Amino acid sequence: MKLSFLHLRGIGGQLAALVVASILAIHLIFATAFLVQRPDQSEQPGDRGHAQLASAIQLLGAAPASERQRLAADIARAFPQFGIESVAPGSAPVAGEADGRALHDLNRRLGNAYRIIALDRHGDTQRIAITLPDGTIISATLRADRQGPPFFGGPWMMTLLFAVISMTLLGLWAARALTAPLSAFAKAAESFSLDGTASLLPERGPEEIRSAAKALNRMRERITSLIDDRTKVLAAISHDLRTPITRMRLRSEFIEDEALRSRMLGDLDQMRAMLESVLSFLRNDGKLEPMTLVDIATTLQLVADQFADMGHKIVYDGPPHVTIMARPDDLHRAITNLVENAVRFGGEVKIHLSTSPQTVVIDVEDDGPGISDLRKQIVLEPFMRGDDARSMDESSGFGLGLSIARAIVEAHGGTLRLNDRQPHGLIVRIELPACGPATE
């Protein structure tokens, strides 16, 4: 069995190394805090002299009564902060507010042979009365214990907080290091195109990520090669078919029947037009022309004038000049396809242009029969026509005009939709970004 988690070039190995490093770091942090704080020491540096006071009282309790006065004076000179004094016999000390922790600590040190009574208290000091084993009463000053650090400010809480922050930062780093290649995969898939402008996915990161990047780059190369081969084959077929079509046209000229000759020539012209449409559709998958500043209003006016010169009723409605970033030839081709469909099925056509800070909207309206809601999405697919009949005549197309127009619009980062026109007809609406597509 291969221990893949020991291989640091893979995702499993990097995660395992991250966990081990985090555990070692936390252990090091806690060990350092333990050595600094030393909770195993019995004598804490903050006992405020309780041990010395207890030793002094025990020394007085063990001394003979004749020597106790002199010994108390010596202790008072050596440790004036204790304030040890003798209490006159017969005067009962009055108990006051007690500091429980300090008294408990002193009582623990003295033992059961000594009795402690809390007297008056001033700030962090308190006077106490101690009854010695022989009944003698002395007074002393007991300093209260320092308040321990608050829970959220204690060393252990700070250590734990530091460990949590460290683990969080390590987790964020690991997530960023491991998910960044996956985000790059998604971006590469979204920006994939057949025009060759998209750069290859960088092959870096863990071994699994690099293998996936290599596979994705090879897949993109295979898809591009497949599309190129398809276009070349169809182009070759189209070129080869032109020769027999030309021969058939020549032979058709010798047909004596005028009606039969006319139908034969019409069929041959339709075959040639079909080949040209298919090749035009395939060329749309090839290299894209560069983006440039285009006056879309002028383009729409030009298309309208071209069709008006051919005898069609068409008008342009919109501002005289609107400039956007676009591919001029492709955009002209898309508008021409839409207007060509409109004049084929309608008597009057209107091109309307409107703008907003974010988008530019182009409406191509006709007064024809329109398209049913069930077929609006279907006719946008290649080789799908608006009529239900599949027969072709002089007025029908090959079902590629809307497909080519939609592909061009989407390449510009826009959308193309089909809407109903009242009382009848169709509105083809194009929405383009005012600043062109987000990525070039």
Image (tube, grey):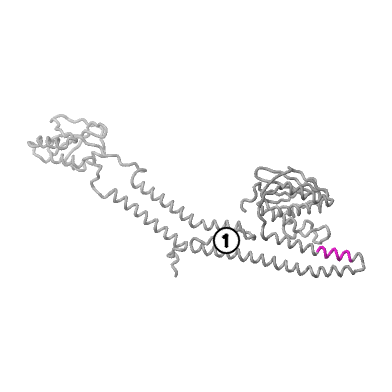
The answer to which of 172 and 145 lies nearer the viewer is: 172
Q: In the drawing, does residue 310 fall left or right of residue 115?
A: right
- Residue at the left extreme, as displayed: 66
List x then y, in percent, for residue 340.
Answer: 78, 54
**Between 81 and 397, the one nearer to me in the picture:** 397
- Is residue 330 rendered magenta in the image? no
User: Which residue is farthest top?
Assistant: 91
Relative to the observer, which residue lies in front, 384 or 253? 253
Q: Is residue 72 left or right of residue 402?
A: left
- Res 109 quadrant in image: top left
Does residue 396 sit above or below 238 in this rendering? Answer: above
* Quadrant, the N terminus: bottom left
Predominant SS of the magenta segment: helix
> Is residue 263 located in the magenta-colored stretch of the structure?
yes
Does 20 sit left or right of 109 as displayed? right
Q: Amino acid at mark 1?
A: Leu
* Residue 433 coordinates in the image, percent (x, y): 66, 48
Give the image location of residue 47, x and y in percent.
Answer: 24, 42
Residue at 64% across, 60% down: 195
* In this picture, residue 389 sits left or right of residue 20: right
Q: Characterize the local packing of mark 1: few (<14), some (14-19) or many (20 or more) Cα atoms within 10 angstroms.
A: some
Residue behind mark 1: 200
x and y percent of residue 352 in the render?
Answer: 75, 45
Which stretch appears magenta?
261-270
- Secondary structure under tag 1 reads loop
Residue 151 lies, with reference to residue 278, above or below; the image says: above
How many numbered callouts? 1
